[in-house]
Image (cartoon, grey):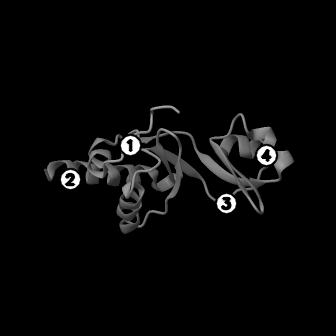
Amino acid sequence: MCDHSGETDLNYLIKNMQPILEDEELVFCSLSPARAKEYFVECQGYYLEREGITVIIGKHLADLNDLAYDLVFKRITLNVHSSLAAVGFLARITEVLAAQGFSVNVVSAYYHDHLYIQSDLAQAALDTLLLWRDKMSQED
């Protein structure tokens, strides 16, 4: 067993998160298992669903391969090592963003949480998170 479990303290996570907006535009595509295998190396992530395999890939790659998608996203990585057992962190994050009208798709990976926000709203979502984090940090 590895001892890299991450932080669980909610106040620590909020005050120490360093959200970073990635430049790449990303899309969610639903593919058959055979087709999805072609993109596993280049995808940001994938998830097996009853209807097919959802892959998160670069928009340029989807366009190049004529893959169907609905919306274009950018990724905000919260850049604090949160535990997969942390309680309330993502609830607070999504609550703050939802209050400002942002839709958020969340992927929690081993080290970090990643937020997928519509591309044209991503910078405003990042600004919202930074302002909220700074406000929370000053309340001590």
Q: Which mark is residue 19?
A: 1
Q: Name the residue under label 4.
A: 36
Percent across and percent down for residue 52 are 78, 57
Tell me if mark 4 has few (under 14), some (14-19) or many (20+) residues whose alpha carbon lies within 10 angstroms of its own: some
Q: Is label 3 or label 4 in front?
A: 4
Task: Name the kind of residue labelled 3 in the image.
Answer: Asp
Q: Residue 70 carries which label?
A: 3
Depth order, front residue of 64/38: 38
Q: Look at 36% across and 65% down and name the residue there.
A: 100
Task: Name the kind of residue labelled 1 in the image.
Answer: Pro
Task: Name the kind of residue labelled 2 in the image.
Answer: Lys
- State the CA–CA distance, disc 2 to disc 1: 15 Å
Task: Name the kind of residue labelled 4 in the image.
Answer: Ala
Asked whether disc 2 touches disc 1, contact meaning CB atoms under 8 Å apart, the reply is: no
59 up-or-down from 96: above or below:
above
Asked whether disc 3 touches disc 4, contact meaning CB atoms under 8 Å apart, the reply is: no
- State the CA–CA distance, disc 1 to disc 3: 25 Å
Percent across and percent down for residue 114 are 49, 47
